[in-house]
Image (cartoon, rainbow, N blue to C red):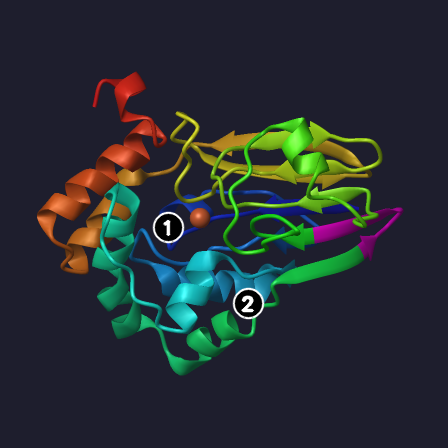
Amino acid sequence: MKILLLADIHANWAALSAIDESFDVCLFTGDAVDYATDPVPCIEWLQKNATHWVRGNHDHSVAHRVTVRPGGTFRKMAAAMRAHHFDVLGDGHLTWLAQMPVTQYLSLGAHSFLMVHGTPRDPMDEYVANVKDEWAARLDHVDVDFVCVGHTHVPMDLQLDNTRVINPGSVGQPRDGDARASYAVIEDGVVEFKRVEYDIDQAIDSMHRAGIEDSVIRQASIVLRSGGNPTAHGL
Ligand SMILES: [Fe+2]
């Protein structure tokens, strides 16, 4: 069984549509929306292709119209794209976001999985990086082979005693210094992390067509082209 594991698409259809991968099952660990301007094709792709999914903090925030107060770079970007989201998303899209479960336990083939966007302790919002002790402290009573997460936008592969914690990285807004769309494939228990180049200009053009303010598009362009690490790329 070949499992395609996706996270943090963030309304970036150019990135999602560049993933050319066959799969038997598609797991999505949250954040379909915000940060870019193509939420509709991203949600409709997930509705058609994802087998199981969980809610990210941005999915929750859009579904329930939680106001984003522009603070740092990312909050400003999310806030600036939000009005366009409400222009283009229909009731069916918003209801789908609102009905996303926060956690999912499932068995696929010989393996058991827990899906959650952040951590089992704080499913939508907690950021925990690639630190074994910190993850071990969050897996009490979690008895599965794989915990699949998202949220940090950085790929992670952490083997604890009986559980492997996998973050496939972000499809639509990588933050590990590699601008390519990030995802993972799990086949018969073997995990492979993958990257694919995509047309970043297409994502930026979409923001212009959506009428997003120029200063925000410039910032979004820097984030996307630098894989979230402008300093390393001299941007
Ligand atoms: Fe995210």
- Front-lying residue, 120 or 39: 120
Quick check: 5 above or below 226?
A: below
Report the residue at 46% width, 66% height from top.
60
Q: Position of residue 113 (x, y in %)?
A: 76, 50
Q: Position of residue 188 (x, y in %)?
A: 82, 39
Residue that label 2 marks: 47
Q: Is residue 51 something that shows in the picture?
A: no
Q: Main secondary structure of the magenta part?
A: strand
Crowd rating for badge 2 (residues with CA inside 10 Å; few <14, some 14–19, many 20+): some
Q: How many marks?
A: 2
Q: Position of residue 166 (x, y in %)?
A: 66, 37
Instruction: Determine the secondary structure under disc 1.
Output: loop
Crowd rating for badge 1 (residues with CA inside 10 Å; few <14, some 14–19, many 20+): many
Quick check: 150 above or below 104?
A: above
Q: Residue 48 falls in which quadrant of the image?
A: bottom right
Whether pointer 1 and pointer 2 mark residues with C-beta atoms closer than 8 Å, the reply is no
Task: Tell which residue pokes out farthest to the left in this image.
Answer: 214
Mark 1 or 2, nearer chain start:
1
Residue that label 1 marks: 12
Which residues fall within the magenta stretch?
A: 107-114
